[in-house]
Each structure stands twice: as C-alpha cells, then as structure tokens.
Image (cartoon, grey):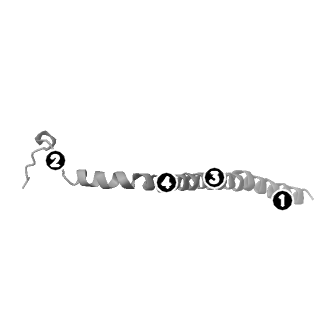
Amino acid sequence: MILKWLFTFLVFYLLYKFIFNFVLPVSKATSQVRNKMNEMNRQQQAYQQQAAGNTYSNNSNAANTSKSSSVKSKPPAEDYIDFEEIK
C-alpha cells in the first residue's frame, strides 16, 4: 500500500517537474518567437509599402541623380594606406 502511494507520488512529482520545467518554458519561448516574427513581418510590409510609395515620387528625381552620380570624383590621397608585400 505504501509502495503504491510512493510510486503515485513519484509519478506526479516527475510529471509536475516535466510540465513546469520543460513544457511551459518551451511554449512561452515559442509564443515569444512567433510574436517577434509577426512583428518583423509587419515592419517589413510597412517598409515595402513605404518604399513602393516613394518610388513613384522619386522617379523624376532618380533620372537627375543618376546622371550626376555617373561622374565620380577621385578620392583624396590620404584615404589610402601604403601596402608592402611580405615575402
């Protein structure tokens, strides 16, 4: 009789430990990751909609900018560091 109670207590204890130390933390982490993914998707969609809205207004400016950006100036000499090859 006592052995049966001990075994039942042990089973419930192990079940309790499994649920509260593994199942609940995993489900909580999963829901947090899912929420972050949904938030990132919303931000990405908002950015894409904003970028799509800006392309129409920037088309006339893009033609002017592409002509001026095609002429590139040479960077100043102090931006370069001399390199010696090591043999």
Which is in the foreground here, disc 2 or disc 3? 2
Across and down, in percent, residue 36 comes to 59, 51
Q: Do the residues labelled 2 and 4 touch (CB within 8 Å)?
A: no
Which is in the foreground here, disc 2 or disc 1? 2
Please, what is the three-letter code of the amino acid marked with disc 1? Phe
Q: Residue at x 61, y 55 (%)?
A: 38
Numbered tag placed on residue 76 in the rendering? none
Q: Residue furthest front?
A: 60
Which is in the foreground here, disc 2 or disc 4? 4
Q: Residue at x 77, y 57 (%)?
A: 15
Q: Quadrant of residue 23?
A: bottom right
Say which quadrant the C terminus sits in.
Answer: bottom left
Residue under numbered circle 3: 35
Q: Report the front residue among 8 and 49.
A: 49
Q: Report the front residue among 86 and 3.
A: 86
Q: Which of marks 2 and 3 is nearer the N terminus?
A: 3
Image check: 46 left or right of 82? right
The CA distance from mark 2 to mark 1 is 83 Å
Image check: 62 left or right of 35? left
Circle 4 packing at 10 Å, graded few (<14), some (14-19), many (20+), is: few
Which is in the foreground here, disc 3 or disc 1? 3
Q: Which of marks 4 and 3 is nearer the N terminus?
A: 3
Residue under numbered circle 2: 73
Please, what is the three-letter code of the amino acid marked with disc 3? Asn
Q: Is mark 1 on a helix, strand or loop?
A: helix
Circle 1 packing at 10 Å, graded few (<14), some (14-19), many (20+), is: few
Residue under numbered circle 4: 53
Which is in the foreground here, disc 4 or disc 1? 4
Q: Which residue lies furthest to the right in this view?
A: 1
Q: What element carries label 2?
A: loop
The CA distance from mark 4 to mark 3 is 27 Å
Q: Report the front residue among 73 and 10.
A: 73
